[in-house]
Image (spheres, rainbow, N blue to C red):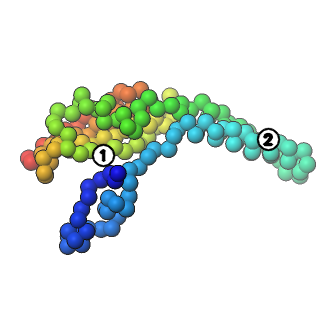
Amino acid sequence: MVDGIEIDKKDAEDSLLPEDLNSLAVGSYVVPNPIRRKYYPAYILSVCALFLVSSFFLTFINFLPTLIILFLLASLLLFLNNKFKINQGEVISNVLPYIKHSIGYYSVALTFIFNLKNILTPVWTVIVYSHESPPKFKTIVEINAFSGDIVTEPYSENLNA
């Protein structure tokens, strides 16, 4: 199964459609599993251990500043929240209550906002168009991937105006 809009090859050539918009060339984007981030502190701590062992043999190099910086970085990464409450497949069902028009097609993107609680908070940004051709309405909704809360007020626009 191919995601996207299928366009006849002759029609695409006649309208000079760029090759990168070919739905057969590009499939859907899958967000990498954020649980993989929990391995990064272990990698950094293993590099710290390597520098610590090296400091015993290479006494002419001071590894202490490097060890401190890497240990602080590993601590920061260890305390990051790496769990999504809302996965990519569940995003559209979570924003349905905020959409006041029919759904024709939509686009979902993952962005991040900086805050002190989670350092980088993942936010799903969803753009939903109505089913008409051309669409009459567009709504943009941003939802927090950790809590499921709406980040900003949904923005709706009448495209015919």
Quarter residue 127 falls in? top left
Q: Amino acid at mark 1?
A: Ser
- 70 or 136, nearer to the observer: 136
- How far is the residue under mark 1 from the one under mark 2? 44 Å
Name the residue beneath numbered marker 1.
107
12 sits to left or right of 43: left
Relative image position of residue 25 (x, y in whole percent): 37, 62
Q: Is residue 146 above or below residue 160?
A: above
Q: How many marks?
A: 2
| Secondary structure category for the residue under label 2 | helix
Q: Amino acid at mark 2?
A: Ala
Relative image position of residue 72 (x, y in whole percent): 67, 36
The residue located at (37%, 45%) in the rendering is 109
The residue located at (60%, 30%) in the rendering is 79
| Secondary structure category for the residue under label 1 | strand
Quarter residue 43 falls in? top right
The residue located at (83%, 42%) in the rendering is 52
46 sits to left or right of 136: right
* Rendered image: mark on residue 49: 2
